[in-house]
Image (tube, helix red, strand yellow):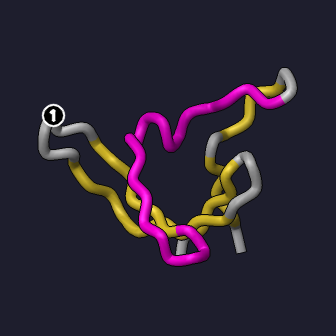
């Protein structure tokens, strides 16, 4: 199981990659701890965000 930590602290399980039918945007499918499925454009999932003046990954890969 591949897990990521969102920069705000939540832990999410990577489910898979998908393609948005309307414009073929690559998407990431991931699951929250409560079972809710989410999708986000791949580019956004892997982007860096500014937190207190520092660039950090939006989702950080957790290594067991």
Residue 42 sits inside the magenta stretch: yes
Query: Which residue is drawn at the image coordinates 25% and 38% (left, top)?
Result: 25
Residue identified by numbered label 1: 23
Total of numbered circles in the picture? 1
Q: Residue at x 63, y 31 (%)?
A: 48
| Quadrant where the image shows the C terminus | bottom right
**Is residue 57 covered in magenta?**
no
Please state the horizontal and vertical placement of residue 52, each as a whole percent of the image: 86, 27
- Image quarter of residue 42: top left
Circle 1: element type? loop
Q: Is residue 8 left or right of residue 31?
A: right
In magenta, the rendered stretch is 32-51
Q: Looking at this rendering, what residue extends furthest in the right direction?
A: 52
Residue at the spot 29% in from the left edge and 43% down from the top edge: 26
Query: Relative to residue 62, is residue 25 drawn left or right?
Result: left
Q: Position of residue 44 (x, y in %)?
A: 48, 36
Q: Is residue 44 above or below residue 63?
A: above
Q: Is residue 62 above or below residue 64?
A: above
Which of the 4 image quarters holds residue 5? Answer: bottom right
Residue extending furthest left?
22
Q: Position of residue 55 (x, y in %)?
A: 75, 28
Residue at 50% x, 77% y is 35
Q: Is residue 35 above or below residue 41?
A: below
């Amino acid at each position: 199981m591949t897990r990521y930590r969102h920069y705000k602290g939540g832990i999410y399980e990577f489910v898979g990659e998908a393609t948005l039918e309307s414009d073929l945007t690559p998407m990431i499918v991931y699951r929250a701890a409560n079972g809710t499925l989410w999708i986000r454009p791949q580019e956004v999932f892997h982007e860096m965000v500014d937190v207190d003046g520092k660039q950090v990954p939006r989702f950080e890969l957790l290594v067991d």
